[in-house]
Amino acid sequence: MLTILICKLLRFLGGLLGRGSSLPGAVALKLDKNILSKLTLPEKSLAISGSNGKTSVTELVRAAAEAAGLRAVCNSYGSNQIEGVATALLAASDLRGRVRADALILESDERFCQYTFKHFAPKYILITNLYRDQLTRNGHSGFVLVELRKGLRQESTLILNADDPVSASLGEGRDAIYYGIETKELDERPDLTHAYDDGARCPLCKAPLHYSRRIVSHLGEYECAACGYKRKPLEHAVSGFDGESFILDGEYRVRPQIANSMFAYNIAAAFSAATEALDIAPETAAAALDGHALANGRVRSFSINGHQGLFLLSKHENSMAYNGALETIKKSEAEEITVVLIADLLSRKYVANDMSWLWDIDFELLADERVKRVFCGGLFAWDIALRLEFAGVPGERLTVRQNLDELMDELYSGAAGQVYALTCFTDQNKFLGRLKEGAR
């Protein structure tokens, strides 16, 4: 009771200061390291993890839960490591340790599942995918796969992306539900040659993995001739795309905020989790997802001297986050396009100054005649410019300014057509905060 009271008090005080997502839980775990194992959880419990999309999928599932009238506890306001999970659970508990909710929806860091779920086992765990992400911290998706497997309790049913051979391998020998993309309308640039291929070898036996279809990067339809490991049949799928809407399971139409393959996976994951883990009627889940605009700031509209703009938060050190944004630009119907790329800070937690991740991003998509200007800003502006020149973007289209005030002045005087701004959450206010017209 004392631990819960202290956590609630710290959460309240932190809320007044606009903070408090992880500190209350950290203090609670210091007072009682086993506090999470003593809680009584709702009957419906779901955890969401993976390299890409977990924050967006968490928000989408929560929207479906609210549409179904479920009272959900969620850590969408902050930390996805054990301290943030503890804050969310204890803040929603009564003094007897009963979490007062109909459903539990938790975002969990893929490397930290092993620490969180040793205390309790969610009934369902959804894994979005496993990509190379934050190499200084994670090293390689194969290493993350090993670490993630440590956190998956056998009593949890897995919801997995069948198109990702790496994360889908977690379902071998246990209960699992699979989702993916069936339609070929969302296949994105299979002709691009990547510097690496995380799907080159079978995650089970390490023999070469053969693809009959690539959707994006190492996601697609695959089979290992050596051990027989292959893409599983899908329980839920994006079965169609008409240019404006995704068709789910051949029946439910959902208009996405962004029409690209990565967002299609987010929608398919959220639909699968809502209907399977939370037992929400598919028509209710689809209606909640239809046209839903993410409130987490990943996508925002703005204007520059009368030019319409779209801000796409694209996590540094994560090639697929940027590739999804670049595909959105590629699919734009605008006759003229301006792109803004800002890299001023790599991480809040460590400083490695490692820009090798720029070479994993498909910047070749910007070597398009419609892209008239590309503005590169921040401490690593010249690193971005060098990568763009190697990608085939003509040097005369590049404007490089490490000083962000100078960059914005150039942008306001030289923007052309539709403007797209890409940067990380660590740098987003350095762009959005310099907009004269503001953003929404």
Image (cartoon, helix red, strand yellow):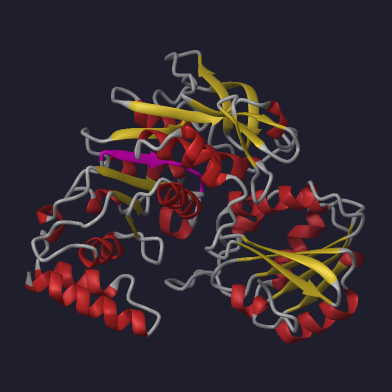
Predominant secondary structure in magenta?
A: loop
The image quarter in which residue 388 lies? bottom right
- Is residue 130 part of the magenta span, yes or no? yes
Quadrant of the frame with the N terminus: bottom left
Q: Is residue 403 visible?
A: no
Q: Nearer the viewer, residue 236 or 217?
A: 236
Say if 229 sits above or below 160 in the image.
Answer: above
x and y percent of residue 375 in the render? 79, 70
The reply, left or right, for residue 399 in relation to residue 154 is right
The image quarter in which residue 76 lies? bottom left
Quadrant of the frame with the C terminus: bottom right
x and y percent of residue 399 in the render? 83, 73
Q: Residue at x 74, y 37 (%)?
A: 189
- Is residue 242 part of the magenta span, yes or no? no
Q: Nearer the viewer, residue 394 or 261?
A: 261
x and y percent of residue 303 in the render? 78, 73
Point out the stretch of residues depicted in magenta.
123-132
Say if 291 sits above or below 85 in the image.
Answer: above
Say if 382 sits above or below 224 in the image.
Answer: below
The reply, left or right, for residue 10 in relation to residue 47 is left
The reply, left or right, for residue 60 in relation to residue 335 is left
x and y percent of residue 381 in the render? 71, 72
The image quarter in which residue 416 lies? bottom right
Q: Residue at x 28, y 25 (%)?
A: 174
Q: Residue at x 45, y 44 (%)?
A: 141
Q: Nearer the viewer, residue 415 or 297?
A: 297
Q: Is residue 94 visible?
A: yes
Q: Residue at x 33, y 40 (%)?
A: 125
Count of numbered tags:
0
Q: Nearer the viewer, residue 43 or 439?
A: 43
Q: Residue furthest front?
A: 69
